[in-house]
Image (cartoon, helix red, strand yellow):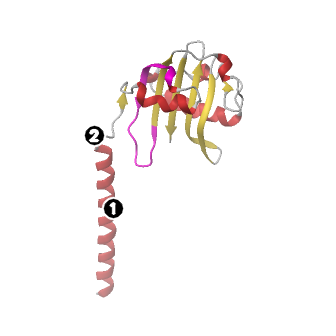
């Protein structure tokens, strides 16, 4: 009888923990602050992007497009921006310590760009963001803020893309 009482107590504790976990999960997912934001980013919201790339945030003319997805409990997300700038010369992007031309990427950057593309190419709502061929062309310069791997697979990336011909900066932050 004592064994049955202990087993039922343990079962009740496990069930209570499961119910609490599910409640937290669904509360988080249904929270009104955890929704996708489309074209709501302002110039002030994206200044860090140009600062990370050492381009200076004073060049921001406008945020043409923006998409910030909701977050999962583990932080999975997709955030992408298209930023019109007042001017970026190709000469500024020649420092190979920071910048890589899209058609001259090493394996790590190629995997990061491929991860970004896997998120972008799956949805026509993001047609304004360059596709993989455009990102990996000689017209695009790439600055990797962060690319994380699990084994040999890229699982998150924060990458800045600059097209000096159009004076546009694209930014992608993804996590799977």
Identify the residue shown where x is 63% and y is 16%: 89
Residue nearest the observer in this picture, 17 or 6: 17
Label 1: how many Cα within 10 Å (few below 14, some 14–19, many 20+) = few
Please report the residue visible at 40 percent of the width from the left and 42 percent of the height from the top. 71
Residue 8 position, x and y percent, is: 29, 76
Magenta stretch, residue numbers? 58-77
User: How far is mark 2 from mark 1, CA to CA?
Assistant: 24 Å
Which sits earlier in the primary sequence, circle 2 or circle 1?
Answer: 1
- Residue beneath disc 1: 18
Is residue 71 at least partly visible in the picture? Answer: yes
Query: Residue 24, how many percent across, how many down?
Result: 31, 54
- Look at the image and say whether residue 122 sits in the magenta stretch: no
Residue under the point 62% across and 42% down: 153
Q: Is residue 63 magenta?
A: yes
Q: Is residue 47 left or right of residue 6?
A: right
Residue 32: assigned label:
2
Residue 134, relative to residue 12: is it above or below?
above
């Amino acid at each position: 009888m004592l064994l049955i009482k202990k087993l039922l107590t343990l079962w009740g504790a496990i069930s209570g923990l499961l119910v609490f976990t599910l409640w937290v999960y669904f509360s988080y997912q249904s929270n009104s602050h955890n929704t996708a934001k489309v074209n709501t980013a302002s110039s002030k919201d994206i200044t860090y992007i140009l600062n990370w790339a050492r381009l200076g945030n004073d060049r921001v003319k406008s945020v043409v497009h923006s998409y910030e997805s909701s977050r999962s409990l583990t932080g999975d997300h997709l955030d992408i921006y298209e930023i019109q700038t007042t001017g970026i010369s190709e000469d500024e992007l020649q420092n190979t310590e920071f910048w890589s031309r899209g058609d001259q990427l090493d394996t790590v950057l190629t995997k990061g760009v491929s991860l970004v593309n896997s998120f972008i190419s799956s949805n026509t709502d993001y047609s304004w963001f360059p596709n993989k061929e455009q990102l990996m062309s000689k017209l695009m310069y790439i600055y990797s803020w962060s690319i994380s791997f699990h084994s040999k697979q890229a699982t998150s990336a924060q990458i800045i893309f600059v097209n000096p011909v159009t004076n546009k900066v694209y930014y992608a932050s993804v996590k799977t």
